Image: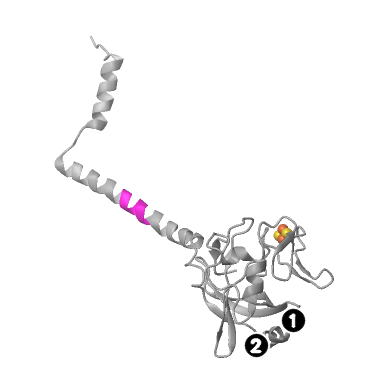
């Protein structure tokens, strides 16, 4: 008479079918397949991760970006200007992890000033804190500001009636030297690196993080 196996014996039987070690060849094949799966998974993960990480990490320290020439006519205007900022246009090359290299039309706001004046008005820019910039904030008697509002990134402009820079989004205002005067912005305007080469003024485009009192480089492309 047939006696069915107990539950425990049945479970032992099922388990042993999977636990069967197999021959040496089978073990080698299984080990090879497991290792190959892990290796392929790792390579796929790496291929996906490199562009993502590349797009998040700044491409270098401040001042290491590409120099772009400012419009010569507008630069001459700034040299003769006194108490009015001048908008200076330029084209900047950018690179994205997913897109081919391209050119972007950008602008900065330039003011005629001096290091003495700026040190007095904007001491934080010359400090060793995270609110400072690791390049001269005044070059050849000029400062150029990023046109991006440090609050949430809108473009501000010079308001002649108010005699201030004013942001249309949430009402932040800044004086001629870029000192934050009103509104929700957490810091003053961001100066960008400026230099002169062969009679041409050049600027480096840097995008700083928004909504923080610190100047944290996010990227060199817009
Ligand atoms: S983005 Fe300029 S005040 Fe908010």
In the rendered image, residue 166, in percent from the top left (x then y), is placed at 76, 65
Q: Are marks 1 and 2 in contact (CB under 8 Å)?
A: no
In the rendered image, residue 9, in percent from the top left (x then y), is placed at 25, 17
- Quickly name the residue at label 2: 72
- Nearer to me, 167 or 178: 178
In the rendered image, residue 29, in percent from the top left (x then y), is placed at 22, 46
Q: Secondary structure at mark 2?
A: helix
- Nearer to me, 13 or 4: 13
| Relative to 32, 23 lies left or right | left
Magenta stretch: includes residue 39: yes
Residue farthest along the top direction in this orientation = 1
Q: Quadrant of the C terminus?
A: bottom right
Of tags 1 and 2, the one toward the viewer is: 1
Residue farthest along the right direction in this orientation = 161
Q: Is residue 107 above or below residue 17?
A: below
Magenta stretch: includes residue 128: no
Which mark is drawn over residue 82? 1
Ligand 1 picture quarter = bottom right
Residue farthest along the bottom direction in this orientation = 198
Q: Main secondary structure of the magenta part?
A: helix
Q: Decide: few, some or many residues near mark 2? Use Cα within 10 Å; few <14, some 14-19, many ≥20.
A: some
Quadrant in the picture for residue 25:
top left
Q: Quadrant of the N terminus?
A: top left
């Amino acid at each position: 008479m047939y006696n069915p196996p107990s539950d425990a014996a049945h479970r032992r039987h099922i388990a042993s079918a999977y636990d069967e070690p197999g021959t040496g060849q089978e073990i080698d094949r299984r080990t090879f397949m497991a290792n190959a799966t892990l290796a392929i998974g790792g390579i796929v993960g790496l291929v996906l991760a490199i562009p993502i990480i590349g797009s998040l990490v700044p491409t270098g320290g401040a001042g290491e970006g590409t120099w772009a020439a400012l419009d010569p006519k507008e630069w001459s205007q700034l040299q003769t200007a006194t108490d009015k900022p001048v908008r200076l246009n330029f084209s900047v090359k950018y690179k994205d992890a997913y897109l081919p290299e391209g050119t972007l039309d950008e602008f900065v706001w330039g003011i005629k000033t001096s290091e003495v004046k700026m040190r007095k008005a904007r001491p934080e820019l010359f400090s060793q804190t995270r609110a400072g910039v690791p390049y001269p904030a005044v070059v050849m008697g000029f400062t150029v500001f990023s046109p991006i509002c440090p609050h949430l990134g809108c473009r501000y402009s010079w308001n002649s009636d108010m005699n201030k820079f004013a942001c249309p989004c949430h009402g932040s205002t800044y004086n001629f030297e870029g000192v934050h005067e009103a509104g929700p912005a957490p810091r003053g305007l961001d100066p960008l690196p400026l230099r002169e080469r062969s009679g041409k003024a050049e600027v480096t485009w840097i995008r700083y993080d928004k909504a923080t009192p610190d100047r944290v480089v996010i990227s060199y492309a817009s």
